[in-house]
Amino acid sequence: MDVEAFVSVHQPQWDRLAHLTRRQRRLSGAEAEELVTLYQRVGTHLAALRAAGADPVSIGRLSGLIADARGAVTGAQAPVWRDISKYFLVTFPAALYASRRWWVGIGLLFYLVAAWTAWRVLAHPDVVDSIGTPDQIKQFVGHDFESYYSDNPAQDFALRVWINNATISAAVLALGILLVPSVFILWDNAVNLGLSAGLMIDNDKGGLFFSLITPHGLLELTAVFIATAAGLRLGWSWVVPGPRTRMQAVAQTGRATIGMAIGLAAVLLVTGLIEAFVTPFLPAPVRITIGILAELAFFTYVWTLGRRAYRHGEYGDVEEADREATAPVSA
């Protein structure tokens, strides 16, 4: 097929479809029927262009026109609250469940590295000497670690914690396409956690350490594991695309990855609120219980809503009807 001739012949129909789509709220009965007819016809044109191997720009432009026309043909958009509820009840938990092996595995490795680092601090005094001077360690153990949670007003502290955690999660998510940087960031955080735990336990402050870190830390670290897993899955989809082309694999995984960002921001907001308003003010048994319950609630959310959505074919991607308009297209 001569692609240029095909485009030249059918361009007026595409322009007409675009015009009717823009005027969708002011169409007469005859124009509404014409819109439906053109929508179906242009969909056939798009399939023909793909089969003929037309350039990606032309295909992408026509895909966008089809997506806009689809909205006009199918009627008014669903209320925003319905989209939000579908995201948090279906799309987000499905994406979490689909990637569960990745982030659970990453979490286990993270805690192993942290535990190994803490053991080295406890078993090898020379490691402690390399961390800092005795006065610096005494200041950290006796004052700095605990005062971190109470030196600032709760609302300011909550915002700062949220921004910090969101930054770390965004970094490992965005850098996951490169694979190695995300691993280094997570490794560094695991080592730092292990060093802090080792120093506190070595100075008989282990109970204080876990009572301060557990309430927010369980859920907070889980969110970081999920962000790391999402980023690494994106990078791995490029290395090992499976039966799909690399562009298809990256597009599909990338849409699900980006879609997880909003949900992770909400999870990190919860952890920030716990860290700012629960940890400094409630007794240790109460705040630890709150932290454990928050983590259990999250896992219940993933393994009930997420598993159910996943079994119905959801995995965190956009609606099937919209994928052609948003996915990169390879000629």
Image (cartoon, rainbow, N blue to C red):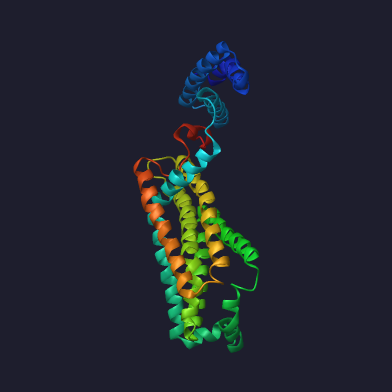
Residue at x 52%, y 33% (from the top left corner): 78
* Placement of 232 over or under 212, stated as above or below: above
* Placement of 321 over or under 140, stated as above or below: above
- 210 or 331: which is nearer to us? 210
Residue at x 58%, y 66% (from the top left corner): 276
| Position in image of residue 165 (x %, y %) | 56, 61
| Position in image of residue 259 (x %, y %) | 51, 46
Q: Is residue 168 visible?
A: yes
Q: How many marks?
A: 0
| Position in image of residue 303 (x %, y %) | 36, 53
Task: Tell me where residue 106 sits by quadrant.
Answer: bottom left
- 43 or 217: which is nearer to us? 217
Q: Is residue 331 visible?
A: no
* Placement of 48 over or under 95, stated as above or below: above
| Position in image of residue 329 (x %, y %) | 51, 35
* Placement of 131 over or under 61, stated as above or below: below
- 235 or 150: which is nearer to us? 150
Most distant residue in the left direction: 311
Most distant residue in the top direction: 30
Please indicate whether residue 213 sits to the left or right of residue 149 in the image: left
